[in-house]
Amino acid sequence: MDLSKKILFAGDPHGNFRPLISAVKRFKPKAVVLLGDYDLDKPLEDLLHEIIGLTEIWWIAGNHDFETPDKHRFLFHSSLANNHLHLKVFDIAGIRIAGLSGIFLGRVWYPPKTPKWTAKNHFINSQHPHTRHNELPLKYQSAIWHDEFHEMAKLKADILVTHEAPGSHKYGFSVIGELALAMGVKHIFHGHLHENYKKIIKQNIQVVGVANSAIADLVGNTITTLNDTE
Ligand SMILES: [Zn+2]
C-alpha cells in the first residue's frame, strides 16, 4: 500500500460525495477525514453507505452544517456522530489527528480581536432570563469559542484538521498556526476556501488547503478533483 494514501482528506463536499466515494474505492485508505460543509439533505451515513465498512470515516463540521436544523441533525445525529474530531485527538491509522470544527464569527470571536464572549455559558448567562435557552442558537454553535480553542492547545497531535484556514491563506487566521505549533503538529489540512494549495508556515508546519469536493493525500497531493467525476 502507498503510505501517502493511508489517510485521505476530503474538501467541502457541498452535497457531492462522488469524488470521495470513488477515491475510497480506488485507493482503499484506512481512514478518510472530511473537512466540513456537507449541505446534507439526508443522514450522512445514507450518502456514504457505499464506503461504510471499507474505511474509517472521521469528520469536522463547517459553517454550512449549522445553517438549518436539518443540515445540523443529518450530521450531528447521524450514525457517524461519534466520529466528530472537534476539540479531540484520535489515533487514526497510527497518526494522532486533532480537529477543530466551525469558523471565527464576529459576534463571538474574530481573532486577532478580543472575544465578545469568551465561553458559551458566558453568552447564555448574559441573555435575558425570559428569552434564555440552555441550547445555543445554531449560529453560535458554528463559532470557534475562545476558551475551547485555548484548552485545545494543551493537547498533542501530528495533524490538525480545521475548516478555517491558518495564516498561510490571505483569508486565514494566524492563531490556527499558533495552535498547531503549541500542539506539536506537523501538518494542517483545511477546507472552507475552495482552493487546493500547499504552503509551509513557521516551524516548518505544512499547510494543505483542500478545494471543494477535492481529495488530498497525506503528503498534500490532490488525487481527485471535482472535474474527474463530472
Ligand atoms: Zn465553509
Image (tube, helix red, strand yellow):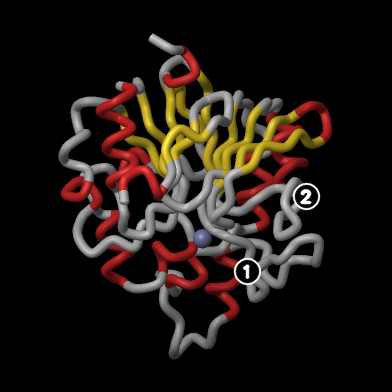
Looking at the picture, does residue 177 appear above or below residue 195? above
Q: Quadrant of the N terminus?
A: top left
x and y percentages locating residue 41 in the rendered image = 23, 64
Report the amino acid beneath label 2.
Ser
Report the amino acid beneath label 1.
Leu
Q: Secondary structure at mark 2?
A: helix
Looking at the picture, does residue 40 appear above or below residue 108? above
Mark 1 in CB contact with mark 2 (< 8 angstroms): no
1 left or right of 188?
A: left
Residue 207 vs residue 23, the one in the foreground? 23
Pointer 2 residue: 174
Query: In which image quadrant can residue 133 be found?
Result: bottom left
x and y percentages locating residue 95 in the rendered image = 51, 19
The numbered disc on residue 105 is 1
Looking at the picture, does residue 7 appear above or below residue 38? above
Q: Residues within 10 Å of mark 1 (few under 14, many from 20)?
A: some
Q: Residues within 10 Å of mark 2 (few under 14, many from 20)?
A: some
